[in-house]
Amino acid sequence: MTYIPTPQTVVFVLIFMMFYLFLLLKKTIKNTIDLYDLLLLSSLAIFPGIFVFAPQFVVYLAHIVGVEFPFIILFGGLFVCVFIYFYRLIIKVNKQEKVNLLLIQEISLLKQQIELMQAISNKKSEE
């Protein structure tokens, strides 16, 4: 099976890769995303680039894996990347939830202490 991408596909993927990677790099420099997320999210642009710029490698890889159509490997790889990203996101959200719970408990304890101290100072001022 031979696979030759059309010039329109090459141009489209190249423009997408350049724009997407530039946007990710810009957000990484501004510390909006961390370096690990940059690497993970950039793979979402690099996988299609491999399929467009190295079609013989993709056909060889599809033959090794044993699939008929190379784009199945592309979608499988993209799915794995998205799955890993969401997995990391869930872990971060759960850690943040635990931190928020501890902070709420600490605020409640501090509020209770302040109210107790105010009650004691009010009693002393009444005497």
Image (cartoon, rainbow, N blue to C red):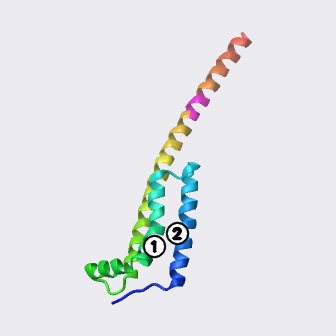
Q: CA distance from mark 2 to mark 1?
A: 7 Å
Observer-nearest of 83 and 6: 6
Q: Quadrant of the C terminus?
A: top right
Q: Position of residue 7 (x, y in %)?
A: 51, 84
Residue at the spot of label 1: 49
* Side of 72 where 93 appears, left or right: right
At label 1, counting other C-alpha atoms closer than 10 Å, the crowd grade (few under 14, some 14-19, many 20 or more) is some
Q: Main secondary structure of the magenta part?
A: helix
What secondary structure is found at the residue carrying circle 1?
helix
Are discs 2 and 1 less than 8 Å apart at CB?
Answer: yes
Residue 111 screen position, x and y as percent = 61, 30
Q: Residue furthest bottom?
A: 1
Label 2 SS? helix
In the displayed structure, 101 sits above or below 124; it is below
Read off the residue under disc 2. 17
Question: Which residues fall within the magenta stretch?
Answer: 107-112
Q: What crowding class fits label 2: few (fewer than 14 Cα within 10 Å), some (14-19), or many (20 or more)?
A: some
